Image (cartoon, rainbow, N blue to C red):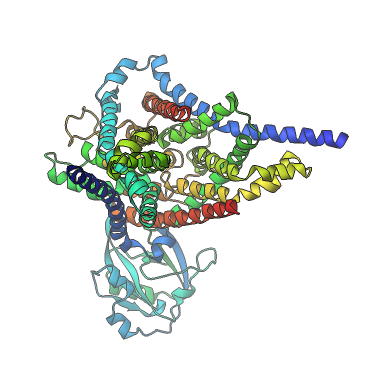
Amino acid sequence: MTQKIKDTIVKGVVYLATGITLCVLLFIIGFIFIKGIGLINWNFISRDYNDTTFYAFVQESNSPTTLDEKVQENKSDYDKKYETPLEAPVYVESIGAEITKVLYKNYTTEKEQFIISYISKGSPLLSAVNSNGTSIDVSTDFVLESVNGNEFTGMSTEEVKTLINDQSGELKIKMVEPGGGIRSNIITTLYMILLSLVVALPIGIFGAIYLTEYAKPGKIVNAIRFAAECLAGIPSIIFGLFGMAFFVVALNFQISLLSGSLTVAIILLPVIIRSTEEALKTVPIAFREGSLALGATKLQTIFKIILPCAVPGIATAVLLSIGRVIGESAALLLTAGTVAQIPGTLFSPGSTLTVQAYYVTKEEGNIEMACAIGIVIIVIVIILNILSRIASDKLNVFNKE
Amino acid sequence: MEAIKRKKIKEKIIENFFLICAFVAVVSVLAITFFVFYNGLKPFVSNSYPFWNFISGVEWRPGSNMYGIFYMIVGSIFGTLGAILLGVPIAILTAVYIAEMADSRIGKIIRFAVELLAGIPSVLYGVFGLGIIVPYVLKISPMAQGESLLATILVLAIMILPTVVSISETSISAVPKEYREGSYALGASKIQTIFKVVLPAARSGVMTGVILGIGRAIGETMAVMLVCGNPIAGIPTSLFDQIRPLTTNIALEMGYASGVHQELLYSTGVVLFVFIMIINLAVNKLVKTKVGS
């Protein structure tokens, strides 16, 4: 009887522990989604982190467009987002748009500025071009700074309206596209994934081929296995230190996309070697014997028989690697920098999504944005998880046949 | 004859090429060790900073040429120890549930959850820690800030869960069925079987998981950096004291350090590296004994 009670208690403890594990996961994901979801919209994905200032050339059209009263009543998109305009919005006929004076706050500055709060259908702003002649997507919440060299600082909304309407011909408007987005980080992350895979994938796969197909048990194989295990156990900050000493300083690659991706490539090696090796091991030995018996050389057997069979396993390796690159931050902090920009060359810095999440949390205390980035990352991680499951199922199905 | 010979040479060349690729891993480990140690031991070899002051000092003030990391070592060890004490029991019990008690559907769901937990980047754990754990710790803390040893322990305990769970679960599942059947035949209950027969049989696998968990906890940087407080001096004496683990010391200052300061950050890396090496060797030994038995 006492044994039964004891068992029930222990069982309860086991359930409790499992419950804690599940709750922790739900809690973390819940926290990140609740905190970050408010920021997720198309602008967040499509805009850069930093504001971009540019000149828009607008052909003034002196056909005053009428503002749809209903739109004004319903409040424009802008008003919904930023609740308190400093002055009532004013419609400027010559550019076919409504402007509003608002107080702009960010983590470091606070200033008054004029923003476009509504653009009517026939507005010449919609066919605006930049100095290179490329067309610009002007949208609501862009900031207006000056027209034909006349700064708006300190003016009232009415004065700005008169100023714009007084100009004639082509208007040269200085605009600011507000930042706060993660486009550059997404692109840097993609570059980082691509570059590190290009380096690590062939090396890892060929290494795994050597270990499974050629190597005879002995000192060399043991050394390679031990090295791969060591690499898997080294924390990423040490990789960062190495990348900094070797790629950044000794090879003089600077803190850059190249240094970052090479460092990450080393981190990926053990992942790729291990999963490829496992995939190669699942290919039945009879396949090899059959191929060799038909007169194929060892190389032909490897490339025409074994590797095609191991493709799902290699796909798993790629997916795991992508997850690893996306999650990597400490090593990249030291080797690729924290600048939120699209790296123009291999030698310019750029921050990936996770580094950016760290940066906005640590330097700006902007947890909302970090969580919004977190949502993007978690969605990607879930997709990768599901894909790799499908890939490994494929591998298993093949083996059953 | 000639063609076959040429083919053979080609095969040999490619085999060697494969060998070189496999050797990249070895070269990388050697290069990492060399570069970190070379830079890290420089200040002691050239006598620009005495080793004893470095290893035993309790203040890190680059401005006044004081670089002591003893309090960081203590912080790293306390943080890791706490995380292990808190996280490992939960992780092992979860593994027991998945492997022994759950029906296959629920087991699959929990396994997926654990995999997801492993896939969340460490920065996000830090953000979570800063957003939830730190404010909560602040509420119960006698100190003026929530960033503390306790917050670090909680975050690390969560982070080692997936590692320990998945490795323990694999080794528990690998225990032969006969062990369980034998135990049942002797009249033991299911719980008794799990805790007296299966778990001891899976001991070395579980230990491997725990040691890998230690490795992850001691090497964790980004999550810890956001919740530990990073003070410039002081050995932590209570759970609410701030700590500055070795890893965050490197990550915080590497961006702008130069000269002796930078070299001593590498030295911090060397100390961390030594810890990790010991852990790696322990894992290696454990895995070998498992194969041996």
- Is B187 in front, or is B88? B187
B84 and B254: which is toward the camera: B84
Q: Quarter holding the N terminus of chain B?
A: top right
Residue B10 position, x and y percent, is 76, 35
Quarter where residue B40 is shown? top left
Residue B54 visible, this angle? yes
Q: Exactly how many numbered labels are in the figure?
A: 0
Residue A189 drawn above or below residue B42: below
In this picture, is B247 found above or below A45? above
In the current view of this chain or complex, which residue is farthest to the right? B1
What residue appears at the point 37 percent right and 53 percent down from the top-left corner? B107
Quarter of image, res B78: top left
* Residue at image location 42% in from the left, 28% down from the top: B286
Q: Is residue A383 above or below residue B136?
A: below
Residue in the foreground of this view, choosing between B81 and A180:
B81
Quadrant of residue B200 within the rendered picture:
top left
Q: Residue furthest left?
A: B142
What is the x, y in percent for residue A281? 59, 41
Q: Residue B241 in the image: state x and y as whole percent.
A: 18, 34
**In screen coordinates, is A202 left or right of A53?**
right
Q: Position of residue A272 (x, y in %)?
A: 54, 42
Q: Is residue A358 visible?
A: no
Image quarter in which the C terminus of chain B is found: top left
Please report the residue visible at 36 percent of the width from the left and 58 percent of the height from the top.
A180
Relative horizontal placement of residue A401, taking residue A249 as reference (left or right): right
